[in-house]
Image: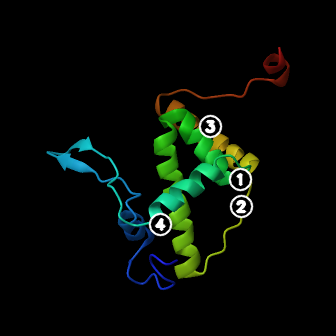
Amino acid sequence: MAEYGTNLRAWKSAKHFTSWLCLAPGNKISGGKLLSSKTRRSSSRAAPLLRLAAVTIGRSGTALGAFYRRLSARIGKQKAVTATARKIAVLFYNAIREGMTYQDQGAAAYDERHRRRVLSNLQRRAKSLGFALEPVPSEVADS
């Protein structure tokens, strides 16, 4: 709170806030091609604290912890820390500026929501290719 105070009106949106914290990727594009998307170094003391909170949350049984674990398995721990810290910053911004309350659904609910999203994407892709997906009967799936 000492870094930015209680009035977050200086930033128009959560995207501006996370960019100021250097938690958003700095896309370098030339000729329509993405050359680099590293995050910048931050002089703010809030960014390292958010990263530390992200690492700690990664060990918890919350939805944010499940998000961190899923990303760290896929893209690596450093990028997962930055992505989770950005998500925490967005939640903080919305809580302070908009008065939003955050209700954690837990890791199981996050995993189920992710599973449903992956399944619907697979069904959509199969349909676009002219196929239809059907669930495997439970007797066959158990063997």
Of helix, strand and loop, which one carries label 1?
loop
Per the image, the residue denoted by label 4 is 46
Identified at 72% across, 48% down, the residue is 107
Around disc 3, counting alpha carbons within 10 Å, would you say few (fewer than 14), some (14 to 19), or many (20 or more)?
Answer: few
For discs 3 and 4, the disc positioned in front in the rendered view: 4
Q: Is residue 120 visible?
A: no
Are the residues tagged 3 and 1 within 8 Å (C-beta)? Answer: no
Closer to the N terminus: mark 1 or mark 4?
A: 4
Give the number of the disc on residue 104: 2
N-term mark: 3 or 1:
1
Q: Quadrant of residue 15?
A: bottom left
For the C terminus, give its image quadrant. Answer: top right
Name which residue type carries label 3. Answer: Leu
As measured in the structure, the alpha-carbon distance from the residue carrying label 3 to the one carrying label 2 is 23 Å
State the SS at label 4: helix
Q: Are marks 2 and 1 in contact (CB under 8 Å)?
A: yes
Mark pair 1, 4: CA separation: 22 Å
- Do tag 3 and tag 4 residues touch (Cβ < 8 Å)? no
Note whether 8 is above or below 78 in the view shown.
below
| Residue at x-position 38% and y-position 82% | 10
